[in-house]
Image: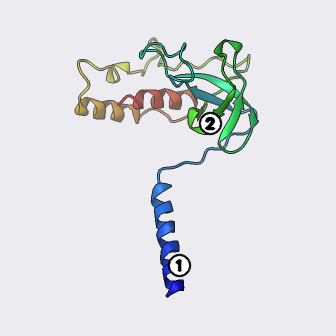
Amino acid sequence: MHERVKSQIQHQTERYAKYSNKGKREVIFEEGDWVWLHLSKNRFPTQRKSKLNSRGDGPFRVVQRINNNAYRLELPCEYDVSATFNVCDLTPFVGDLEQDEDEEPQDLKTNPSQEGGDDDKLLAKGPITRSMAKQIQEGLKSFPKEGAKLLFTWAIMKYF
């Protein structure tokens, strides 16, 4: 009887853990990685005075990994806060910070003088409705999914 109750408790605990960890994602940063920082109101009161100000800043370089949940960042001195942050306040930075001198900078928008560019599909005329959002998403599927164009596509898609 005791073993049966013990196994039932173990089974129920595993079930609870499965459902509570369902939406969690484990993100581990290494030293030298670049991250975006979430500016919370209680920790950054001067940067978050208005609700229209940006809620994030960066990218900042990870200087030290304290453990899987805490990281020390390289912050500018104007922040006047501790440089140690929880992983829930950090988002991985995806992009290139360094650019070769011989490489031309990529334009995130189609060049207006270039033939074949059809920006009119992406411009919303009037309020964005569900059908308009679907049309925009269909138009974005024709873009190649690489490099800066992927970031541009993601930046547009997150607003719909």
- Mark 2 is surrounded, within 10 Å at the Cα level, by few (under 14), some (14 to 19) or many (20 or more) other residues, namely some
Measured from the top left, where is residue 8 in percent x and y?
Answer: 48, 77
What colouring style does the render use?
rainbow
In the rendered image, the quadrant that contains the C terminus is top left
The residue singled out by tag 2 in the image is 86
Tell me the SS state at disc 2: strand
Tell me, for residue 144, which label it has, or none.
none
Q: Nearer the viewer, residue 93 or 142?
A: 93
Q: Nearer the viewer, residue 41 or 64?
A: 41
Q: Are marks 1 and 2 in contact (CB under 8 Å)?
A: no
Question: Residue at horizontal 29%, vertical 20%?
Answer: 124
Question: Residue at horizontal 71%, vertical 44%?
Answer: 67
Tell me the SS state at disc 1: helix
Measured from the top left, where is residue 137 in percent x and y?
Answer: 35, 34
Q: Nearer the viewer, residue 92 or 51?
A: 51
- Residue with the most extreme front position: 2
* Left or right of residue 106, residue 71 in this image: right
Q: Amino acid at mark 2?
A: Asn
Question: Residue at horizontal 47%, vertical 32%?
Answer: 154
Mark closer to the chain start, 1 or 2 = 1
Tell me, for residue 6, which label it has, or none.
1
Figure quadrant of residue 143: top left
The number of numbered discs placed on residues in the rendered structure image is 2
